Amino acid sequence: MTALALELCGIEKRFGATRVLRGVDLDVHAGERHALIGPNGAGKSTLFSLIAGERRASAGRIALRGADVTRLTSAALARRGLARSFQSTSVFAKLSVRDNLRCAMLASLGGGAGLTARWFGSSRAAKQIDARATGLLDALDLSHVANHAAAALSYAQQRALDLGLALAGGAHTLLLDEPTAGMNRAEAARAIDLIRTMTAGKTVLLIEHDMDAVFGLADRVSVLAQGRVIATGTPAAIRANAAVREAYFGTPTGAAGASDE
Ligand SMILES: Nc1ncnc2c1ncn2[C@@H]1O[C@H](COP(=O)(O)OP(=O)(O)O)[C@@H](O)[C@H]1O
Ligand SMILES: [Mg+2]
């Protein structure tokens, strides 16, 4: 049996009379890189907001590492090791790049203001945080801009920092929403390389439009269309899947719901 990092069962989400998600079932294996693709407006970002505890599902169940987390808040989920990056950047614009990473590390320690104060008061702990920040800056190729305000970074650098913030908190499961959005091809290829190396050993569920990125990175791909996951499989199987072709290109098919699992 494969350990599941995430398990979604029958997830529904309505906005008023609009049913965006109509019974999403999705398994993400521990340690896999799983891409979620689907037409614009399919509900991919909405699904992420439910998994991350930012919104409540109208129905269904979400399990993280086997534990029911359907009703947990985003803060509680973050403490359990789930991190989310956003379609737009979520850094503290005026803080330096290094301080953004330090803040993410401190926040992940939890325990409230008392613990944070003790950590600030402990020079050994501060040194540990500095050392981890330095390591992350190096891995993210941001050392040369470590002391710049985050707002001064290029767009691609801000996205790298965004990934770093998710990693700085020590998350084991990462939700990445369109990590290459707005990048040129070279930047996107670099971002994918960065994600691959930085998330080794972690579980990644990512929304991605760039098919080169999806096929270069993902172990498995799931397709969200008409409010459901219509197919899950290896990148090659998904590329060949008739139902997926129909969802994207409108070509007729008799293979709806096909899956190679
Ligand atoms: N807060 C909201 N209120 C009403 N409708 C929403 C809300 N958020 C998203 N939607 C609708 O849900 C659908 C799915 O949106 P979204 O999850 O952003 O899709 P995707 O990320 O797949 O492009 C869209 O039709 C969008 O207009
Ligand atoms: Mg989206």
Image: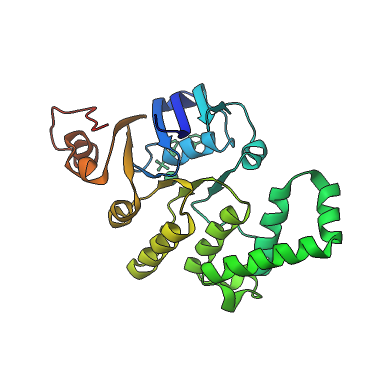
Q: Is residue 29 left or right of residue 83?
A: left
Q: Position of residue 20 (x, y in %)?
A: 42, 30
- The answer to whether any part of residue 226 appears in the image is no
Quadrant (top left, top right, bottom left, bottom right) of the C terminus: top left
Location of residue 177 with respect to 14 vertically, above or below = below
107 shown above or below 47: below
- Ligand 2 resides in the quarter of the picture at top left
Residue at horizontal 24 percent and vertical 27 percent from the top: 257
Residue in the image at 46% along x and 49% along y: 177
Tell me: residue 115, above or below residue 15: below
Q: Is residue 208 visible?
A: yes
Residue 76 locus on image (x, y percent): 66, 36
Q: Residue at x 53, y 57 (%)?
A: 163
The reply, left or right, for residue 187 in relation to residue 238 is right
Q: Is residue 15 left or right of residue 124?
A: left
Find residue 7 and report its horizontal and vertical position in percent: 46, 30
